[in-house]
Amino acid sequence: MTDTGGQLDRRLERAILHLLDRRGPTATICPSDVARAVYAGDDDGWRALMEPARRAARRLVAAGEVEITQAGQPVDPARARGPIRIRRAA
């Protein structure tokens, strides 16, 4: 999947917001949900989109749209290590 002019970045950001819109107001999603939603193939190629999905979530945190959580608590995206979840900002 090639990224021309940030098109992939925008698709990932839209996918995050769309997936969250389809869930309850306090529900969370995993970056893998986002990667799978954007990846068009049937194989494990979505895994290559995991870090781009995490970066998209960090941009949306900076924009005030979402929070990144670990163990149910908001965390500083720059300090988050390991599995994260994404939810709408409170």
Image: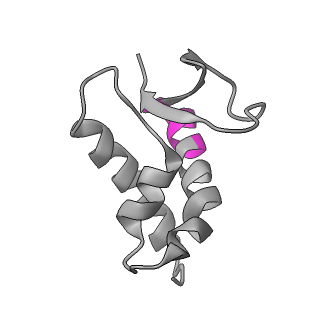
Q: How many marks?
A: 0
Against 75, residue 18 (above or below) is below
Q: Residue 50 in the image: state x and y as whole percent.
A: 59, 59
Q: Which residues are magenta?
A: 58-66
Q: Residue 9 in the image: state x and y as whole percent.
A: 50, 63
Colour style of the rendered protein structure:
one colour
Residue 27: quarter of image:
top left
Q: Residue 8 in the image: state x and y as whole percent.
A: 48, 70
Which of 76 and 45 lies nearest the eye of the viewer? 45
Rendered residue at 36%/61% (across/down): 37
Rendered residue at 72%/38% (across/down): 82
Against 5, residue 66 (above or below) is above
Whether residue 63 appears in magenta in the rendering, the answer is: yes
Quadrant of the snapshot with the C terminus = top left
Left or right: residue 86 compared with residue 76: left
Which of 84 and 90 lies nearest the eye of the viewer? 84
Q: Residue 22 in the image: state x and y as whole percent.
A: 21, 40
Residue 74: quarter of image:
top right
Left or right: residue 17 compared with residue 8: left
Rendered residue at 56%/45% (across/down): 59
Left or right: residue 88 compared with residue 19: right
